[in-house]
Image: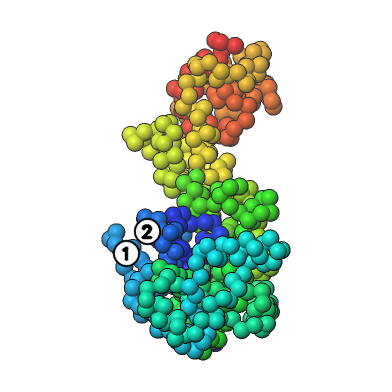
Amino acid sequence: MTDVRVRFAPSPTGYVHIGGLRTALYNYLFARNNGGKFILRIEDTDRTRFVEGALENLIKVLDWADLEYDEGVFVEDGKLVEKGEFGPYIQSDRVKAGIYDKYINQLIEDGKAYYCFCTQERLDGLREQQKADGMMPKYDGLCRGVSLEEAKQRVANGESHVVRLKLPANTDIEFDDLIKGHLSINTNDIDDQVLIKSDGFPTYHFAVVVDDHLMGITHVIRGDEWVSSTPKHVYLYEALGWQAPTYVHLPTVLGQDKKKLSKRNADVAVEDFVKKGYLRDALVNYIALVGWSPESNQEILSHDELIEQFSFDRVSKSGGIFDVKKLDWVNSHYIKELSDQELADLIKPYLEEAGLVSEATENEKILNIASTFKTGLDKLSDIAEQTAFLFEDYKSEGYYDEVKETLVSEDAKTVLNHIKSILENEQMNEELASTIMKKVQKETGVKGKNLFMPVRAAISGQSHGPEMSHLFMVLGNKELIERLDYALNNF
Ligand code: GLU
């Protein structure tokens, strides 16, 4: 096989869809798995969709995800630069360089494409009529009848026009897809695709074929939504006398409702997941599993394991469901793997944002919080809600509402008094934190629920939460004694 060359070819629209990240990831994994090249090409020929800063943002997301590419557009020292021998890698720059002109002229001269002068009104009217007649809306080919000589004259006179692909009638176009298998579609069901728009820009369909060919792309790996366009692309390759690449259309990323994951029904932007505190390795690991499973059936896979085990044989034909609960599970796994200090550094901004700690808060405190809450976090942003009780004023109204009843019994008073007296004499440390409850049990004879519930209630105002030993560590002697006192005096 010739050396694998694949590309991720997004249109920068302002954010990166989670499905786009998966497309980029599968391209990357396939390239690395085969010792090939991974290329980033920017498809920005639709000027109406141009968004300022979208390109830089896109590159930032790929960098964040660690999907290193070999050629294409990069940001260096805040500037866009290109690397590789097949540039430019931004389609609008390729338009300026006149790259598409030669090929559209070749198609026109060979009678494989034609100028079309139909106005928007005519096309709209045609579409309405066809719909009313219960037909599939399709260009009726009126301008196929204009001779090339006349067409050239009209173009020279400045008449507004597009260039369309001239598909042969009633011909089956066939191709093999590595995931979907053999596909065939008749040209009677395909429109004479516009290749050059009236603004002179190539459409996606034309540019993608020219660029993939000139860049030596061996495998086109992209979302399922493009499979219906592929026959046009296959025909274009043939019309230009080129060999088409191998096609790989990936199953759609679906939401829990089995509908295409979209902004309307869920979070879809990678940036949103980053903000919520999903770790890079977790999100990449999980998104790889949406529509693919390794032969090993592992669910936790490192970057290198993904590269090693990835193959299209195990990508499913039907859509993959994006399950946030499963993502949470994978993420919590990766959070548990972090050292306390790593987690402390990661949660600090979330605690600061919630106004719970400040820049000046000592590391020790955040470290304690990190080790205390590590096992219960699905994502970093959960930290603020889970730790709020530590920072809230326990004297404020409502703090103890949920657990008041637990604090009134004689046993409760005995336990709280006893624990308080221990804390007045001994400094909290890990040893004490893990033995103090046993000690209280032994010395007071109170055990089980009657022992644990009042203590947890008094020091946290909650009936459930992190392990007791962690709570002792994170609160420390002074705060613990104050809380115990308050509970003893007020209930
Ligand atoms: N520019 C297209 C997109 O944004 C790329 C489709 C393709 O990979 O051919 O999805």
Q: Earlier in the sequence, mark 2 or mark 1?
A: 2
Q: Position of residue 437 (x, y in %)?
A: 60, 28
- Give left or right: position of 406 versus 483: right
Looking at the image, do the residues carrying marks 2 and 1 touch, with CB atoms under 8 Å apart? yes
Front-most of residues 200 and 450: 200
Q: Amino acid at mark 1?
A: Leu
Q: Position of residue 36 (x, y in %)?
A: 48, 78
Residue at 63% x, 20% y: name it: 403
Bin the neighbour count of mark 1 within 10 Å (Cα to Cα): few under 14, some 14-19, many 20 and up.
Answer: few
Q: Which residue is mark 1?
A: 80
Judged from the image, the secondary structure of the residue bearing numbered disc 2 is: helix
Judged from the image, the secondary structure of the residue bearing numbered disc 1 is: strand
The answer to whether residue 360 is seen in the rendering is yes
- Quarter of the image with the N terminus in it: bottom right
- Give left or right: position of 20 versus 75: right
- Give left or right: position of 92 versus 475: left
Front-most of residues 463 and 241: 241
Residue at 34% x, 36% y: name it: 359
Bin the neighbour count of mark 2 within 10 Å (Cα to Cα): few under 14, some 14-19, many 20 and up.
Answer: some
Q: Amino acid at mark 2?
A: Glu
Residue 168's disc number: none
Q: Which residue is mark 2?
A: 56
